[in-house]
Image: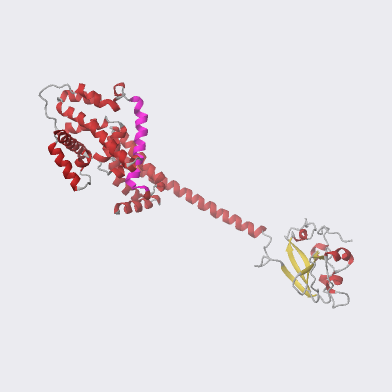
Amino acid sequence: MHSELKDGDLLRRMLAGDEQAFSALYRAYQAGIYRFARQMTGGAGLAEEVTQEVFLTLMREGRSFDARRGSLRAWLYGIARNCIRRCLERERPYVGLDSRGQEENTADLLPDLCVGEDGMAELSSRETVEQVRRAVLALPAAYREAVILCELHELGYAEAAQILGCPVGTVRSRLHRARELLAPRLKCLREAPAGAVAKQCHRW
Amino acid sequence: MLEDLERDTFMPAVVRDQALQHAEDCAYCRARLTAARLLSLELGALAKDDERLQAPAQVEANLLGAFRERARRRSRVWWGLGWAGAAATVVIAAWLLAEHPWRGSGSSAGPKIQAVVPAGTLHSVSPATADKGRNETAEALAFGKGSRPVPRRFVADTASDFIGLSTSSYPLGDGMVVRVELPRSAPALVGLPIPSGDVSGTVTADVVLGQDGMARAIRFVQPEERQNASQNFGLNRN
């Protein structure tokens, strides 16, 4: 509640032309927005573009924010989500042919990828993180955003539903499906040798 | 249920205990719960790794530059609107002072009364008498024959005969004649043409008021300064 009051006050001051208020809002939310964009797109450049666009939208259309419909954070994440979708649509023509059709069927490919060699080496923590990152990035967008918001950003189902513009039940089912897709992929990666992992991850 | 258990989502303690007990007993569910926990650990590691991520400082610099530019533009717009408003106010005020018909007529916006004269023995005036009274002068209609002397200014400068205004049955009695200035459009109210040459915005008229305060008759007056001019109200007197 305190945060919402603070946000409302900062927003009013920002709309009145207070640069300090804008700066405070930016510093409060830029990291989350940037992370969300980067985790969704996988690219630092796109994430910067999205972050910039979100806060330009806040400048232009801050008056349209309605606190009764949700928090400022949810509103900003919603803008970010729309920007990300536009960016992904724009970038789609440049995705390699290998990536086509992977969205729903990546899990089906895993058994082939997992044909294993013995002597699986334990992955370092860093490698594990990168594998998880790539696995998340390979999820279909609807599942990816659910898992990023609920698992990586630790938002509640209700706030995630506000951001995604869908019922809470839909968020839960998308999250469940996302985890179902992720678990076998990561299991496979844990069991595969490092060289094979690199090859698989490249395909994702 | 699996996600709720693993995420520690709020749920009744009894349900939670039952679910955990089931996971202990059922190998399949135990494996799923273990896998879910492992997945959460991995996602948690990714979240922790990404905690340090922030937008580059250049993004903030760009945005602050855009904010300042926007504030400057808004300021210019408001200044422009302010100046336009002030200019419009000045123009309107100047027009009111220069063109408004009420200028110079004091604070009252109504007819300006120039003089009041007792009517003496007035005759009743009605629309019917207005036509036949074409040759009657102000004395005949308003002051009565043989009554007190009529002020000179009330005699010589008439531009029209008296025209009856009301058909009140109340006796005229000792009414009075009031000389007033009226808007230029006043002649039109009694069917006379509006004076075209007049630019002052007003016309002068004598109004006969009865004892009941009702206007009984009116005649339009050509001011002395206009008598020498060829223009009149378009009301030719025979």
Question: Where is B139 relative to A154, above or below?
Answer: below
Return the residue nearer the eye: A193 or B87. A193
Give the quadrant of the C terminus of chain B: bottom right
Tell me the quarter of the picture where residue B181 sits.
Answer: bottom right
Instruction: Indicate the quadrant where residue B212 lies.
Output: bottom right
Looking at the picture, tell me which residue is in the foreground, B42 or B37: B37
In the displayed structure, does residue B164 sit left or right of residue B78? right
The majority secondary structure of the magenta stretch comes to: helix
Find out whether residue A7 is within the magenta segment: no
Pick the residue in front: B120 or A104. Answer: A104
Q: Residue at x 27, y 44 (%)?
A: A156
Image side of residue B171 versus residue B22, left or right: right
Residue A142 versus residue A100 in the image, above or below: below
Residue A134: x percent and y percent? 23, 30
| Colour setting | secondary structure
How many numbered tags mark residues here? 0
Q: Residue sitting at 81 percent across and 76 percent down? A: B173
Q: Which quadrant of the rendered structure holds the N terminus of chain B? A: top left
The one nearer the camera, B215 or A180, is A180
| Residue positioned most to the bottom | B148
Question: Quick check: is A83 in the magenta stretch?
Answer: yes
Asked which quadrant contains residue B111, the reply is bottom right
Q: Is residue A77 visible?
A: no
Percent of width and height locating residue B62: 35, 41
Q: Position of residue B47 (x, y in %)?
A: 22, 39
Question: Is B181 left, or right, of A50 in this rendering?
Answer: right
Residue placed at 39% from the left, 45% from the top? Answer: A59
Residue A173 visible (yes or no): yes
Q: Residue furthest left?
A: A119
| Residues rendered magenta in the picture | A69-94
Q: Position of residue A20 (x, y in %)?
A: 33, 50
Taking the spot 22% from the left edge, 24% from the top edge, the residue there is A110
